[in-house]
Image (cartoon, rainbow, N blue to C red):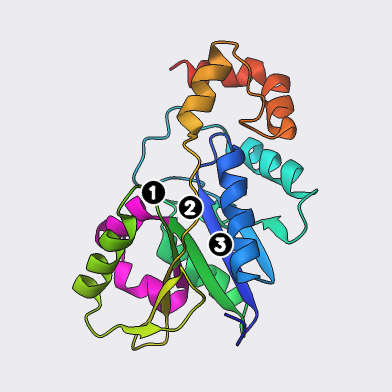
Amino acid sequence: MRSRPLIALLGGSFNPPHIGHFRIALEVQEILVPREILLIPCASPPHKTGDNLLPFSLRLAMLEAVTRALPGLGVSPVEAERPGPSYTVDTLTALAARHPGERLAFILGGDDFSLLPSWKLWRNIPELADLIVLPRRAGAEKIFLRAVRARWPEAVPLSFPSGIRAFSLPHGGRILHLPQPRLEISSSLIRSRWLEGKSLNFLVPKEVEEILDKNAAGILPLWRS
C-alpha cells in the first residue's frame, strides 16, 4: 500500500459519531499506515431520510473536536460544498482532483459492499479509490469473495500479510478485505440512550457527549421526531 502516499476515507452520517467509528479509523491506520485518514460526514444521504439528521455543522464540529487529539486523522467538509444528494462517486471525484499523485482508499462495511451495485455509477468507484472492506458478521470473508468473483471475474489475487484478502482490478484499482473486530455500536443506539438520559460512557468520546449536551435544545426536537 506504500507505492504512492495513501489517504484513507471513512464516510458516514455520524449522527452522532461514536467509538465504533474511531476504532475503524484507528484499526485501518495501524494495518495500512496511510498518510492520513479523513472522516467525511455526509451532507445529504441519498439512501436515508434526513428527518432526524443533525445539522452538518454540528456533526462536523463533533468530528473535529475528537480528531484534534488523534494524530493522522482529519475531517473533510467536502460533501457540504455542493448541492444535492451526497453520492460517493461525486465525493471521490472531487477528492481525487484535490490529491493528485496520491492514492485514495475508501472504507466501507461488508453490508455496504454487498449493496454497491445500487450506488450511483458504482463501477466507477474502484477506478477512483481502492476499496477497504470491513467484516460485519460471521462468514463475511466468504461473502466478500463471492461478490468479488461475481462482479470482477478478471480480478487477480494479491499477496498481502496474513489475514488480508486483496485483489487487483484491470484498471489498477484494488479491493482489500481487512480482518478486524467490529463493535456492535450504532448511532441509533446512542440517540436512544441520550434521549432516555442514560450514560454514554465508553460509547462516545467525551467531546461528542459535551457537544450533544450543550446543544440539547436544538437536538431534542430532531431526535424525538
Task: Give above or below for 49 relative to 220.
Answer: below
Residue at point 41% right, 57% down? 87
Camera-side mark, 1 or 3:
1
Range shown magenta: 109-131
For the residues marked 2 and 1, what is the alpha-carbon distance in whole angstroms?
Answer: 32 Å
Residue at point 58% right, 56% down? 81
Q: Nearer the viewer, residue 62 or 79?
A: 62
Query: Picture coordinates of residue 196 (x, y %)?
Result: 54, 11
Q: Circle 3 is placed at which residue position?
A: 9
Q: Circle 2 is placed at which residue position?
A: 83
Let me know if residue 97 is in the magenta part. Answer: no
For the residues marked 1 and 3, what is the alpha-carbon distance in whole angstroms?
Answer: 18 Å
Let me know if residue 111 is in the magenta part. Answer: yes
Query: Quick check: marks 1 and 3 in contact, CB under 8 Å?
Result: no
Q: Nearer the viewer, residue 168 or 82?
A: 168
Residue at the extreme left of the image, as rendered: 150
Task: Give above or below for 76 relative to 62.
Answer: below
